[in-house]
């Protein structure tokens, strides 16, 4: 599990990081909202933990910005602000859960597990960009209403790109998330599969949706 923790208190951030790492999680820590937003844009995560009172961008605003790009990722607000009004604002911003400080790490871990469990078991909505639609339940992909047949690997790659549409995804991330292997810089297998996708979902349609960002990776966008 990859977790983004945005917390401006270095001691608390270290406490949370060590707890998650002890549970074999990969943890990225940002110490202010602006850096947190940059980290969110840089790579995908399974869960995001947000403090509220932070420099530059507070947790409520960061949560709203994240929700503009990703409505599915579980977000837990972690803060000393525990009034009903504060909780209402957090949930209104798009948070899935709210844990007041001080807390025991075990409770944070249990809540995080519950969030990811609900995320993976909830009915999955169709993923869409322009006229490209992927239905995670039926595994059917269409473009402009025309069904597109994909191999298992092509489907997994497209689903990953759609879930992160608008974000530049590196070859390393694709290798780890879609192929579940460490990236081999001597192979062009990812570029080959991107080519397969382009022929199937872009060649006969407009606008083109799969874009190469030289030196960085790929992005799915209009």
Image: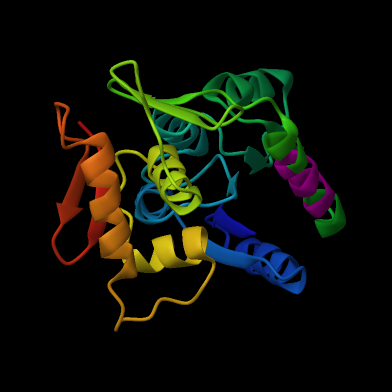
Q: Position of residue 183 (x, y in %)?
A: 41, 76
Q: Residue at x 68, y 36 (%)?
A: 119
Indicate the quadrant where residue 109 lies.
bottom right
Judge from the rendering whether residue 29 lies leftward or rightward of residue 56; answer left or right. Answer: right
Q: Position of residue 108 (x, y in %)?
A: 78, 50
Relative to 31, does residue 110 appear above or below in the rendering?
above
Vertical relation: 103 (above or below) 187: above
Does residue 188 lie above or below 95 as drawn? below
- Who is closer to the viewer here, 70 or 104? 70
Image quarter (top left, top right, bottom left or bottom right) of the C terminus: top left
Determine whether, in the image, residue 195 is placed left or right of residue 64.
Answer: left
Q: Nearer the viewer, residue 108 or 210?
A: 210
Task: From the top left corner, tell me how far across and down residue 103 is, in percent.
Answer: 81, 51
Colour basis = rainbow
> Residue at image x 46%, y 34%?
70
The magenta stretch is 109-116
Would residue 82 be seen by someone viewing this image from the given angle?
yes
Relative to residue 24, is residue 195 drawn left or right?
left
User: Where is the N terminus found, in terms of image quarters?
Assistant: bottom right
- Using the rendered image of the protein, determine whether residue 101 is visible from the camera's viewpoint: no
56 with respect to 116 (left or right): left
Q: Is residue 177 magenta?
A: no
Q: Position of residue 200 (x, y in %)?
A: 27, 39
The residue located at (52%, 56%) in the rendering is: 8
- Which of the 4 image quadrants contains residue 7? bottom right
Nearest the eye: 213 or 108: 213
Q: How many marks?
A: 0
């Amino acid at each position: 599990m990859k977790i983004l923790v945005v917390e401006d208190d270095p001691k608390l951030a270290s406490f949370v990081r060590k707890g998650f790492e002890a549970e074999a999680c990969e943890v990225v820590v940002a110490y202010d909202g602006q850096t947190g937003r940059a980290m969110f844009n840089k790579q995908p995560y399974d869960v995001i933990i947000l403090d509220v009172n932070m420099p530059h961008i507070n947790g409520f605003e960061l949560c709203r910005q994240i929700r503009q790009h990703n409505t599915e990722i579980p977000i837990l607000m972690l803060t000393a602000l525990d009034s009903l009004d504060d909780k209402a604002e957090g949930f209104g911003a798009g948070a899935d859960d709210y844990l007041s400080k001080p807390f025991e790490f075990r409770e944070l871990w249990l809540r995080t597990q519950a969030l990811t469990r609900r995320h993976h078991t909830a009915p999955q909505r169709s993923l869409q960009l322009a006229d490209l639609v992927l239905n995670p339940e039926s595994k059917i992909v269409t473009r402009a209403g025309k069904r597109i047949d994909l191999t298992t690997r092509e489907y997994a790659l497209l689903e990953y790109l759609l879930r992160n549409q608008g974000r530049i995804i590196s070859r390393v991330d694709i290798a780890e998330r879609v192929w579940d292997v460490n990236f081999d810089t001597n192979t062009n297998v990812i570029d080959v599969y991107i080519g397969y996708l382009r022929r199937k979902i872009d060649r006969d349609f407009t606008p083109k949706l799969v874009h190469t960002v030289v030196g960085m990776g790929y992005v799915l966008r209009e």
